[in-house]
Amino acid sequence: MKTRLLLLLFPLLGLLAGYLLRKIAAEEAEQGKKYFLFTRQILLFIIMILLVRTTSLSLPILGVFLAGIFCAYVIRLRYLYLGMLAVAAFTMTPEWTLLFLSLMILYGLPFGTQLITKKPCAVLGKYIVLYLLPLLLLLTPFATSSLFPVFVAGTLFLRE
């Protein structure tokens, strides 16, 4: 159990590695901006498809998915929803947990390369806190609900 909880921290390594990559190769990161954005969108689409793979289409499922889209439209904090994805992945089998966490590490690389700021520690700290905040959901029964991954998929649907 403790090992699986520690695994939830690994997606943050992708964000940090992406930021370091930006520092090392700033010129190349600027030239590849559209490719990094495309990579992030593809990864989110793959994650979203995998999240809803097991649910059959019904009115409650569609409603929860639309609620996720609305929530993401109102609150545009991508790493908050990635933290929710980590919680959803934690409630799945270990194989699916590793798959989702690996995809989140891959998402963090291009995301981190796009962080352009004069206060990098503050911005990285903000994303880390936003990622860790949803881990409190593990204390609630909502995290183990079969509708939770569908809600998370809806939050990832929103374009950046």
Image (tube, helix red, strand yellow):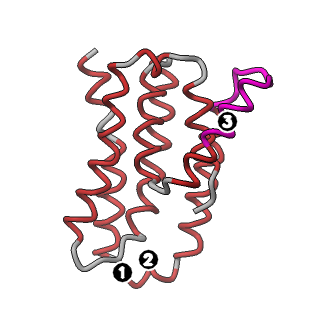
Q: Is residue 10 magenta?
A: no
Q: CA distance from mark 3 to mark 1?
A: 37 Å
User: The residue tagged with tag 3: helix, strand or loop?
Assistant: helix
Residue named by callout 1:
26
Q: Is residue 133 left or right of residue 87?
A: left
Q: Is residue 134 left or right of residue 71?
A: left
* Magenta-tinted stretch: 51-68
Residue named by callout 3:
65
Q: Label 1 is placed on what type of residue?
A: Ala
Foreground of the two, 89 or 157: 157
Q: Position of residue 29 (x, y in %)?
A: 44, 76
Q: Position of residue 43 (x, y in %)?
A: 58, 50
Q: Answer with mark 3 or mark 2, whichever residue precedes in sequence.
A: 2
Q: Main secondary structure of the magenta part?
A: helix
Q: Position of residue 9 (x, y in %)?
A: 29, 38
- The answer to which quarter of the image holds residue 101 is top left
Residue named by callout 2:
29
- The answer to which quarter of the image holds residue 112 is bottom left
Q: Label 2 is placed on what type of residue?
A: Ala
Q: Residues within 10 Å of mark 1 (few under 14, many from 20)?
A: some
Foreground of the two, 145 or 128: 145
